[in-house]
Amino acid sequence: LTEYKGQRFYTTEKVDGSSITICCTNGIVSVCSRNLRFAMNTDNNYVNTVKKNSIDTKLGAYCIKHNRNLALQGELLGPTIQSNKYKLEDYKIMFFSVFDIDADKYLPINDVTKIINDLQLEFVPILDDNVIDELVEMARGKSVVNPKIHREGIVFRLVSPNDIHVSFKAINPDFLLKYDA
């Protein structure tokens, strides 16, 4: 924290889901969990949610049109994920970063939100875009996804036009107590 003191960070809600990455390389889209890569004909919540929301089609067309290879990173939320704390009736993906595969770097927030908006996808809730000093206190609060429960925490990411990708999390102690995490 000392190294980045005075730099501008933005904070997002840390949603409690399952990690998902959707990659497009040379126009071919693939879906990954934290540790596995799935064939697009796999019958599971990851691939089914991507297909149901046409994310594979949208991302493939976008990457071909812009001649880019990208990886979208997000959280899969829904009925069988992390006890469905948000009480969602269906699965959805909330994105938080985009990795430029060709440049081997994470994109800055302005590029990320533009791509996510261009693809008509959902970004994790942005809570603040200023420097944060009171991390744990900031982590407290109700979820934007479902205001009836405590949010898991918040994620801080450096707002920077350069190639540095810095992020860190602050976990909500109320969430830890409630869910025995």
Image: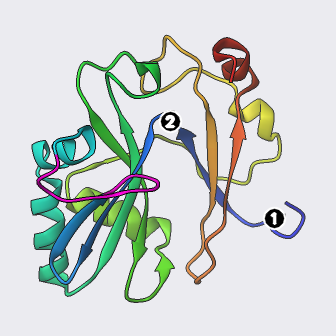
> Which quarter of the picture shows residue 150?
top right
The residue that appears at 16% across and 74% down in the rendered structure is 28
From mark 1 to mark 2, how far is it between C-alphas? 26 Å
Q: Which residue is mark 1?
A: 6
Question: Does the magenta-highlighted stretch encompass residue 61?
Answer: no
State the image coordinates of residue 128 (x, y, percent, origin top left): 59, 45
Residue 85: image location, x then y, percent: 46, 18
* Amino acid carrying mark 1 in the image: Gly
- Is 142 placed left or right of 58 in the picture? right
Look at 60% across and 52% down and name the residue there. 129
For mark 2, give the secondary structure: loop
Q: What scheme was used to colour the molecule? A: rainbow
- The residue tagged 2 is 15
Residue at x 9% of width, y 61% of height:
57
Magenta stretch, residue numbers: 32-42
**Hey, what amino acid is under mark 2?**
Val
Residue 21 vs 150, above or below: the answer is below
